[in-house]
């Protein structure tokens, strides 16, 4: 991953954290070219940092976004359909 792409990921994460509640899908849909496994990995790194800094709400929010995005991209196993 290039530094430029990583900067774009961090910028998008920042936008997600700052947007009004419920606007997250619109923020993500505005930059579909960044929605990939690398973005999800970067979200998890930031969430881990938040958790270590005591920002549990921020960490949980980002983990939720990463999980939902992973499902949409087919990167997260959907165990509910395997019964």
Image: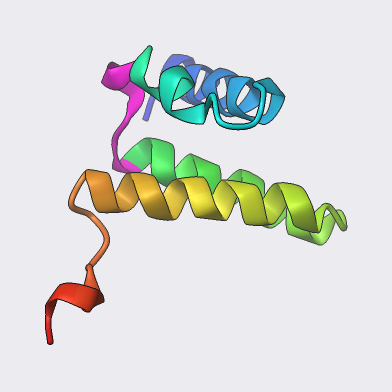
Please give left or right for residue 1 compared with residue 48 in the image.
Answer: left
Is residue 35 part of the magenta span, yes or no? yes
Point out the residue furthest to the right here. Answer: 54
Q: Looking at the image, which residue is at 49% across and 25% down?
A: 9
Q: Position of residue 8 (x, y in %)?
A: 49, 17
Q: Looking at the image, which residue is at 27% across and 61% down?
A: 76
- Along the viewing direction, whichever of 31 and 25 lies nearer the viewer: 25
Q: Quadrant of the C terminus?
A: bottom left
**Quarter of the image where one finds residue 13:** top right
Q: Position of residue 64 (x, y in %)?
A: 52, 53
Magenta segment range? 31-37
Q: Position of residue 80 (x, y in %)?
A: 23, 76
- Along the viewing direction, whichever of 55 and 80 lies nearer the viewer: 80
Q: Quadrant of the N terminus?
A: top left
Point out the residue furthest to the left here. Answer: 82
Please give left or right for residue 53 compared with residue 80 in the image.
Answer: right
Is residue 56 part of the magenta span, yes or no? no
- Along the viewing direction, whichever of 58 and 44 lies nearer the viewer: 58
Please give left or right for residue 53 compared with residue 4 in the image.
Answer: right
The vertical placement of 31 against 23, above or below, is above
Q: Looking at the image, which residue is at 87% across and 58% down?
A: 54
């Amino acid at each position: 991953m290039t530094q430029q792409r990583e900067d774009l990921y961090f910028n998008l994460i920042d936008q997600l954290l700052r947007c009004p509640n419920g606007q997250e899908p619109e923020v993500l849909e505005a930059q579909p070219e960044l929605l990939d496994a690398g973005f999800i990995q970067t979200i998890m790194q930031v969430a881990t940092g938040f958790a270590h800094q005591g920002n549990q709400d921020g960490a949980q929010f980002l983990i939720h976004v990463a999980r939902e995005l992973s499902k949409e991209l087919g990167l997260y196993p959907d165990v509910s359909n395997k019964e």
